[in-house]
Image: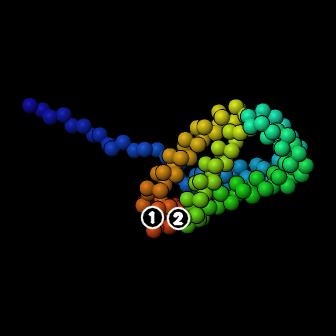
Amino acid sequence: MRTRRTSRRPARSWTLPPAYVGWFFLWTSGIHVGIVAADAGLYRHFADGALVPGLASAWSSAFMSHPAIGGLVVAAGEAALALLLLLGSTRWRRVGWAGTITFQAALLCFGWGFWLWSVPAIALLVRAAVADGRAADGPWSSQPMTLVDPTR
């Protein structure tokens, strides 16, 4: 009788490493700097489809009164979140995860079109934050995060 050999590998769960999310947020902060440099008026219609009553008028009166400053504040916020994920200690990385998830959740207020991006992004970010928290060097461990995997 011949036994059948199987080479089953344990199933791996795929998640986004914190460094990937950090670099992505750093890149998107650069996009906001580019928008401000090119024409800050491009932000004018961002809140036109807002789902929250009064958000469109608040956007036009508050943000669009000084769109360059508003755009740079958004860029600085995204860069700060990126640096928390890239360079932060385990405690600060937890803040970075919470900030990136909150940022995506806030985008949901600006219209149904943002739901196409933000709902899957929130799902990926929550999954990545949980996996990072469970990792050996995650936010709940005593080890610092490494940007490069020494085993590769």
Label 1 or label 2, whichever comes before in sequence order: 2
- Residue at the disc numbered 2: 90
Q: Can you see residue 105? A: yes
Q: Percent from the top left, x then y, of residue 127? A: 50, 46
All told, the count of numbered labels is 2
Colour scheme used in the picture? rainbow
Which quadrant is home to the C terminus?
A: bottom left
Q: Residues within 10 Å of mark 1 (few under 14, many from 20)?
A: some
Q: Is residue 42 above or below residue 82?
A: above
Q: Percent from the top left, x then y, of residue 74? A: 76, 53
Q: Is residue 143 above or below residue 46?
A: below
- Contact check, label 1 and label 2, Cβ < 8 Å: yes
Q: Residues within 10 Å of mark 2 (few under 14, many from 20)?
A: many
Residue for point 65% across, 44% down? 104
Q: Can you see residue 30? A: no
Real-space Cα distance between discs 1 and 2?
A: 7 Å
Which quadrant is home to the N terminus?
A: top left
Q: Percent from the top left, x then y, of residue 147? A: 54, 61
Closest to the observer: 43 or 60? Answer: 60
Looking at the rendered structure, the kind of residue marked 2 is Thr
Q: Is residue 14 above or below residue 80?
A: above
Q: For the residue labelled by badge 1, is the local secondary structure a helix, a strand or a loop?
A: loop
Tag shown at residue 141: 1
Residue for point 21% across, 37% down? 5
Looking at the rendered structure, the kind of residue marked 1 is Ser
Tag shown at residue 149: none
Q: Residue reaching furthest right?
A: 65
Q: For the residue labelled by badge 2, is the local secondary structure a helix, a strand or a loop?
A: helix
Left or right of 106 in this view: 85: left
